[in-house]
C-alpha cells in the first residue's frame, strides 16, 4: 500500500506580514519557510500508520508543487521519515493549478491514500485536497481528525459542527486532515537528516492545467482603535459598556 | 443567468449564517442583474424555505435524491454543479464552513471555475472579477482576480451580515440525476453533543487560557457564558493539558471563529491564538500582564487576575439580565 502526502511550503506562522511599497506584492525577505502545519500533521500520521502496519504500508511519498527554493522543506519531510519525494517544478498561482498538477502526477503514479492538510497557513486556501479528488474522480473526506486502518480498510472520523462522524470510503481516496489527526509533528534527528540526503527527490515539469485566478494586490487590515481599559475594581462596568457602547449584548 | 447559493440546513432548519449567505448572493446578483437561486438539499419545510425570500432568493431548488442522505462530497458537488449548469450560474456561493470546505473545491473543478475561499466583502469589481479575502489568517487581505467564466466563492462567516430584501420566491424540485453506484461514503457512527452552543455558530464567546490557573476554576467562566448565552472556548495550552476538550480550542490550528463578542480570560494573545479570533467584532482581554499582546488586539481590557475579576463580571451580567 502506498500513501501520498501533499506538502505546501509556507512562511513560519509567526512571520510578520509586510507589503511591498506599492502593495502589489508581499515582502518575503528574511522569511523562514516551513511545512504547512496541517500538512506536517498529515505526514506525522502517515508515518505512524506505516510504522504500525507490519509492512502493509510500503512507502510514504511527499509531493509539493514549487520551485527549487522549496527543497529544504521537502528534505525536512524526508528527514522525519518520508521515503521519497516528488517536486513539480512550478511556482503555482492558485489551488486549481496545484491540484491539477498533482492529479497529473497521480494519474501515472497511483496511490491508495492521499493526505492533504485542510488549509494552508499563507493564503488560507482550503481547496487543494477537494480539487485533487475531483480531478482524479475519487472520494474525498474533509475535516478528518482521525485515520486508522482496520485490517485493510481505512476508518476515519470527521469533525462536523457539534460532533463527529465515523466514515468509511473505498480506496483510493483523499483525506483532508485537521487538528487531532496527530499530536505533535516530528522533529528531524541527525540520523534522519543524514539519511534524507540519500533519499530520492524526483523533479518533474508541470503537465497539469494552468491557474484560474491570480492575486493582483494586498492590503493590511484597518488599524484597531486603542484598547479602552476598565479598572479591575469596577470590572462589572464592562457589561454596561458591551451593552450601551459596543451594542453586542 | 443566475447566482447560485448553497443554503445548508440542520435538521430541516436554516441558521443565521444561511440568511447572511443569501443576502450576500443577492447583493452580487443585483449587481449582475440576474436571479438569486438557492439550492437546498434534503427535507426542509416550506415555511422555512419561504423565509429565504426575505433575504433575496428568487427561487429555491429542492434536491431530495437519496444519495445525498449522508454528506458524500462527490455526490453533493455533482448535485450543486448540475444545478449551476442548468441555471447558467455565473457565481456559486458557499459558506466557508465544514460543508463549504468539503464541497466547494469539487464544484469548482466540475465547473472549471476559479475559486476564492474566506471572502470578506462584495466583489471589488465585476469586470475583471476581483474579490477580497483573508490571507495569513486575517493578518492581511488579498485581492484575488478570478479569470474563469464561472466563479466559486466561499464567504467568511459574519463578514457581510444579514441584509433584508423582499422578493417573491418560487419553490421547485430539482432532480440531480445521481448515479448511486458512484457514491460510497459510508456513515458508521455519528456522535453529537446536544444542548451546547456550537462554537462556530456562537455570536458571543467566552474563552479561557492558562491564566485561569486550574481546570477547577472554570465554573464562573461557564456561568458567565450561560448568563450571556455564549459559547465557551479555550487556548491551545489549555486544550493540550487536557483542562478543556480539544473541540473548544480556537486559534491557528484549532477553530477559526468570528463572533460578535470574544471575551479572552487569562489568554496572552500569542499570534497563533489571534489568528483564530481576530475577525471577532468586539474583543475583550483580561490579563495580569500589561504587556500581553491581546491588549493590542482588544477593544476593551481589564488588567488583573481573571479569577478575581470573573465573579464581578458574573454578578454584573446577572444584574444586566435581570433588568433587560
Image (tube, coloured by chain):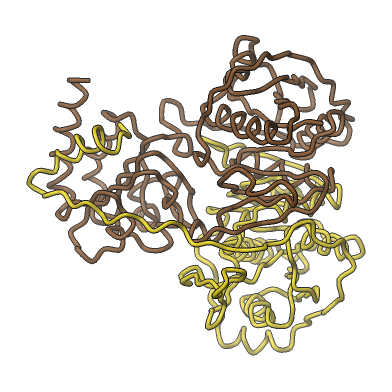
Chain colours: A yellow, B brown
Q: Residue at the right extreme?
A: A108
The answer to which quarter of the image holds residue B297 is bottom left
Q: Quadrant of residue A240?
A: top left
The residue positioned farthest toward the left in the image shown: A233
Q: Residue at left 46%, top 58%?
A: A221
Query: Which percent across, then down, holds residue B217?
Result: 21, 45
Residue B309 in the image: x percent, y percent? 14, 45
Residue B319 visible in the shown view = yes
Q: Residue at x 49, y 62 (%)?
A: A220
Rendered position, A63 above or below B70: below
If the image is split into quadrants, where does the C terminus of chain B sit? top left
Asked if one can make out residue B213 in the rendered structure from this viewpoint, the answer is no
Q: Residue at 73% x, 68% y: name it.
A: A60
In this view, B147 is above or below B165: below
Q: Is residue B137 left or right of residue A232?
A: right
Q: Is residue B158 left or right of residue A5?
A: left
Q: Residue B163's x, y, as percent?
A: 53, 28
Please state, as top left, top right, bottom left or bottom right, where the N terminus of chain B lies in the image: top right
Amino acid at each position: 500500500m502506498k500513501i501520498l502526502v501533499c506538502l505546501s511550503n509556507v512562511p513560519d506562522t509567526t512571520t510578520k506580514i509586510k507589503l511591498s511599497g506599492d502593495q502589489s506584492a508581499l515582502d518575503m525577505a528574511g522569511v523562514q519557510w516551513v511545512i504547512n502545519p496541517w500538512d506536517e500533521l498529515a505526514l506525522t500520521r502517515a508515518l505512524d500508520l506505516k510504522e504500525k502496519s507490519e509492512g502493509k504500508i510500503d512507502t510514504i511519498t511527499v509531493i509539493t508543487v514549487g520551485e527549487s527554493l522549496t527543497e529544504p522543506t521537502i528534505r525536512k519531510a524526508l528527514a522525519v521519515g518520508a521515503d521519497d519525494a516528488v517536486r513539480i517544478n512550478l511556482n503555482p498561482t492558485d489551488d486549481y493549478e496545484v491540484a491539477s498538477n498533482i492529479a497529473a502526477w497521480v494519474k501515472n503514479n497511483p496511490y491508495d491514500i492521499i493526505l492533504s492538510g485542510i488549509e494552508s497557513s499563507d493564503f488560507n486556501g482550503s481547496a487543494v485536497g477537494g480539487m485533487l479528488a475531483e480531478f482524479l474522480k475519487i472520494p474525498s473526506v474533509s475535516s478528518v481528525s482521525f485515520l486508522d486502518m482496520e485490517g485493510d480498510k481505512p476508518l476515519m472520523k470527521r469533525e462536523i459542527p457539534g460532533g463527529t462522524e465515523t466514515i468509511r470510503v473505498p480506496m483510493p481516496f483523499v483525506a483532508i486532515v485537521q487538528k487531532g489527526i496527530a499530536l505533535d509533528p516530528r522533529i528531524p534527528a541527525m540520523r534522519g537528516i543524514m539519511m534524507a540526503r540519500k533519499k530520492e527527490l524526483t523533479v518533474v515539469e508541470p503537465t497539469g492545467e494552468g491557474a484560474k485566478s491570480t492575486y493582483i494586490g494586498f492590503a493590511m487590515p484597518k488599524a484597531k482603535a486603542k484598547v479602552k481599559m476598565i479598572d479591575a475594581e469596577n470590572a462589572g462596568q464592562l457589561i454596561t459598556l458591551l451593552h450601551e457602547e459596543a451594542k453586542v449584548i | 443567468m443566475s447566482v447560485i447559493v448553497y443554503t445548508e440546513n440542520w435538521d430541516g432548519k436554516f441558521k443565521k449564517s444561511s440568511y447572511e449567505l443569501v443576502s450576500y448572493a443577492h447583493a452580487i446578483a443585483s449587481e449582475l442583474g440576474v436571479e438569486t437561486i438557492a439550492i437546498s438539499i434534503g427535507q426542509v419545510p416550506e415555511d422555512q424555505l419561504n423565509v429565504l425570500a426575505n433575504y433575496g432568493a428568487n427561487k429555491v431548488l429542492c434536491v431530495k435524491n437519496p444519495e445525498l442522505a449522508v454528506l458524500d462530497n462527490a455526490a453533493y458537488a455533482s448535485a450543486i454543479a448540475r444545478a449551476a449548469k442548468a441555471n447558467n450560474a455565473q457565481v456559486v456561493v458557499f459558506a466557508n464552513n465544514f460543508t463549504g470546505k468539503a464541497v466547494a473545491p469539487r464544484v469548482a473543478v466540475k465547473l472549471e471555475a476559479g475559486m476564492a475561499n474566506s471572502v470578506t466583502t462584495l466583489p471589488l469589481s465585476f469586470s475583471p472579477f476581483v474579490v477580497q479575502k483573508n490571507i495569513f489568517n486575517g493578518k492581511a487581505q488579498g485581492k484575488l482576480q478570478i479569470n474563469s467564466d464561472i466563479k466559486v466563492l466561499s464567504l467568511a462567516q459574519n463578514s457581510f451580515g444579514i441584509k433584508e430584501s423582499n422578493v417573491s420566491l418560487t419553490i421547485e424540485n430539482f432532480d440531480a440525476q445521481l448515479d448511486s453506484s458512484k457514491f460510497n461514503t459510508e456513515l458508521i457512527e455519528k456522535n453529537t453533543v446536544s444542548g451546547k452552543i456550537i462554537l462556530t455558530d456562537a455570536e458571543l464567546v467566552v474563552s479561557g487560557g492558562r491564566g485561569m490557573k486550574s481546570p477547577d476554576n472554570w465554573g464562573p467562566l461557564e456561568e458567565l457564558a450561560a448568563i450571556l448565552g455564549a459559547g465557551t472556548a479555550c487556548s491551545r495550552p489549555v486544550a493540550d493539558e487536557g483542562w478543556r476538550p480539544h473541540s473548544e480550542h480556537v486559534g491557528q490550528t484549532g477553530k477559526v471563529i468570528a463572533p460578535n463578542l470574544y471575551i479572552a480570560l487569562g489568554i496572552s494573545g500569542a499570534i497563533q491564538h489571534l489568528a483564530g479570533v481576530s475577525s471577532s467584532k468586539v474583543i475583550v482581554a483580561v490579563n495580569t500582564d500589561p504587556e500581553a499582546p491581546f491588549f493590542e488586539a482588544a477593544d476593551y481590557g481589564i488588567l488583573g487576575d481573571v479569577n478575581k475579576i470573573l465573579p464581578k463580571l458574573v454578578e454584573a451580567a446577572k444584574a444586566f439580565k435581570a433588568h433587560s
